[in-house]
Amino acid sequence: MLTLKRLPQSVLLALYGGAAFAALIPAAHAQDTASTTPTAPVAAQAEAVQSVSIVGSRRVGNASSTDTAVPVDFIPMTKATEQGGQFDLAQVLNNVSPSFNSTRQTGADGADLVDSAALRGLGSDQTLVLVNGKRRHTTALVNLFGARNRGNTGTDMNALPLMAIRNVQVLRDGAAAQYGSDAIAGVINIELKKSLGCESVLGYGQYSEGDGENWLASAYCGVAVAGGVLGITGEYYDRGRSNRAEEGNPRIIGDTKAQNKTLYVNGEFPAGPGKLYLAAGVQTRDASSAAFARGGLGSDDIPSRNSAAMYPDGFVPFINGDVDDRWGTVGYRWRVGEWNADLSQTYGYNRLMYNIANTLNASIANLDLTGGGRGVSASAFDAGGFSFRQATTNVDVSRFYGGVMNGMNVAFGLEHRRENYKIFAGETGSWIDADGVGEGGNAGSQGFPGFQPGDETDADRHSSAGYVDIETDVTDRFKLQAALRHERYSDFGSTTTGKLAGAYRINPQVLLRGSVSTGFRAPSLQQAYFSSTFTDFVSGQPLDVVLAPNGGPVANAAGIPQLKDEQSKSYTLGLTWSPTQATSVTADLYRINIDDRIVLSGRFDADNYPALGATLQQLGVGQAQFFVNSVDTKTQGLDVTVSNRMDLGPGKLNTFLALNFSKTEVTGVHAPSALIGFEDVLLSERERLFIEEGAPRRKATLGFEYALGKLETSLRVVHFGPQTLGTFSGPPVANQYYEAKTSADLSFTWAFTNKTKFTVGGTNIFNVKPTVQDANETDNGFKYESVQFGLNGAALFARLSHRF
């Protein structure tokens, strides 16, 4: 059993006064993201064909690290890969970037298996993720029960291995006019490695409670191929289950068990007058999440949810998910006169299939019992699942005019995207009500009832877009950027967005910058077509509970209109200050207004809406909920970063401070005409708080790194502000209040040689946990929710890295 949590804070802080954060983000400005050193033939081509320098700008070459018109964080991943205490990308960014939000779920069904990305406290589907500048697909999963991003889809950050990543760029500004749908809160661009040489990492971690073992084996090798470089990354990551439930509590609360097997490639090669580039990745994930426990003999769960013959002492069903994620892009960059051209095709696919284990179908067991059998059913079921596929074709053209004012870059392009969403039905035993409606045993596999044949979906759509993007150095002090984009979707129509940004250098040390933009987010196919049906008892009567797809008979009967795009207006105003070459400061105010946000409604039935309830019951539906464009929100806040590098004694100290203050408010609830007067059901107090405070309203990271000879020591302190979440009972029961918490990570690295390093350290070294709540009122039935701060407590880790 690890005992790190028992050390007093004063002793641990005295061990070191500096840590590894500044090395992760040496500056909060844009940096050049050109490829690492290529072979000689590739280098010879570099002057003729250049690539985009930084997310948020399509200006080729000569991008400055100190004069971007919008805030961009540049996060090199070398330190995190070789020496970090977090083993997956979502947790690394969650502890590094204050504007980044990711909550590791527990007790939230499929959401336990996937960690999505989000910025500035908005939804995970309001942040666009790019890989090598190309749009990455979202997951097939819609976050539903118990999840912070309720009703959202998102991008699975953990499908990409850390070892494959050169850097991550976080554009903290609305950019739909540049990149299209989803870029309301900002854009995260992940640049993959394609450098020569090989490296490997072995890692191990474990919580101080003695569980949640993490094993990591990862390797990268960049080889010269056809005059270019091909980088290959392979990774195996085994994350063990953790459990923070109290003694005697049958629940399992903590990290899901997961095994990831991942392979990625990334390369660029000279071909004719230009360069051929490609990147591809595949990951399979076997994950397992624990559902709510079912009681045994003497409980009310027999025979409704259990069988005395199968689980006399009760049981915990396991929601096992097989995740298959594939991504690839191939393209060609070339030069036509003074013009740079880029033609690419990107493909993404994500599938999640459920297998429910350690379970039963109580209706089958009850039918067996009443028929003279022991009262048993199968203990595992194929419950079906879903998939999402996306194919994107891009043509991008740009040119720099050095003779226009002080230089002007003109870029324009076209994009065509095709998407497909499928729901697969589970085996009959996973959903059937075998003993008849209203009899003793509940239908479907306990923990997660399978998708029924009526839920099966095969939906397609396509969209086309065109954009123009102009960036001009009006004078040597004043830069202006403008973008305009028009998109047309086959399912809801068209939209046009625009952006205007500028930067003015007041003096060599101070830059004033700002932007104004409009944006949009298209409703995802997952939101439009997700369908789930299971049987429950409503007022003593067995009726179907339906999450009804848009445009289906239930949604139409309820008067739910066709989903349309969310629309936004974004404003930023900030400055950068570089008093010395070793110190930089940025501060950016922002405001994001979103109209017609898509939300998942509450359940409508005969009790809370008698007229609609009667209509639903005629369709055999007891309760129904829907996705609907009904909420307006306002998000405003402040981002601040400070970084400094200095000599301290015989060594070097890097220091970094980053803060995010953000507040989201629901400013309006607009019910469809058929639901007017029932806004409290459409968006309850509990659901409103998920939107407003699903992420803490403030977050700060203070980091130090001190290097002395072969020893590097690091300390990172992360502060999470308070959160208020709703309760199951609702008013007048008091809401859940989570106090502000502060975590600290400490590590020591010894360089045996300049190629081999060994790191030991701890995360959340003071074993801080969330504020205790009433377990009867939480989403997961435990004494605290899954909040961004985390609930597992302290952990130790070790890493061994070697470069070949």
Image (tube, rainbow, N blue to C red):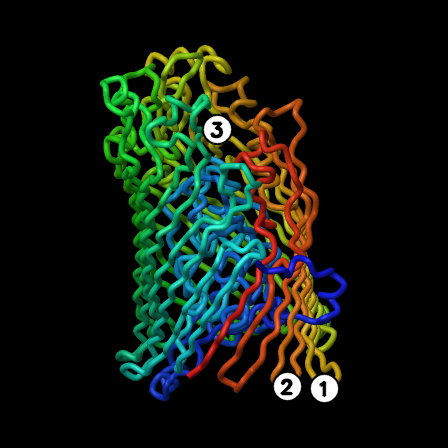
Nearer the N terminus, badge 2 or badge 3?
Answer: 3
Q: Amino acid at mark 2?
A: Gly
Instruction: Choose top left, top right, bottom left or bottom right for residue 515.
Output: bottom right
Q: CA distance from mark 2 to mark 1?
A: 9 Å
Left or right: 346 in relation to 499: left
Q: Are marks 3 and 1 in contact (CB under 8 Å)?
A: no
Q: CA distance from mark 3 to mark 1?
A: 61 Å
Q: Are marks 2 and 1 in contact (CB under 8 Å)?
A: yes
Q: Residue at x 46, y 79 (%)?
A: 802
Q: How many marks?
A: 3
| Residue at disc 3, secondary structure | loop
What residue sits right under mark 2 in the picture? Answer: 709
| Residue at disc 2, secondary structure | loop
Nearer the N terminus, badge 3 or badge 1?
Answer: 3
Q: Amino acid at mark 1?
A: Pro
Q: Which mark is residue 597?
A: none
Across and down, in percent, residue 402 comes to 50, 76
Q: Which mark is residue 650?
A: 1
Q: Is residue 589 visible from the viewing direction of this image? A: no
Q: Amino acid at mark 3?
A: Ser
290 shown above or below 20: above
The foreground one among 748 and 228 is: 748
Q: Residue at x 31, y 78 (%)?
A: 269
Across and down, in percent, residue 363 comes to 30, 23
What residue sits right under mark 3 in the picture? Answer: 601
Q: Is residue 223 visible from the viewing direction of this image? A: yes
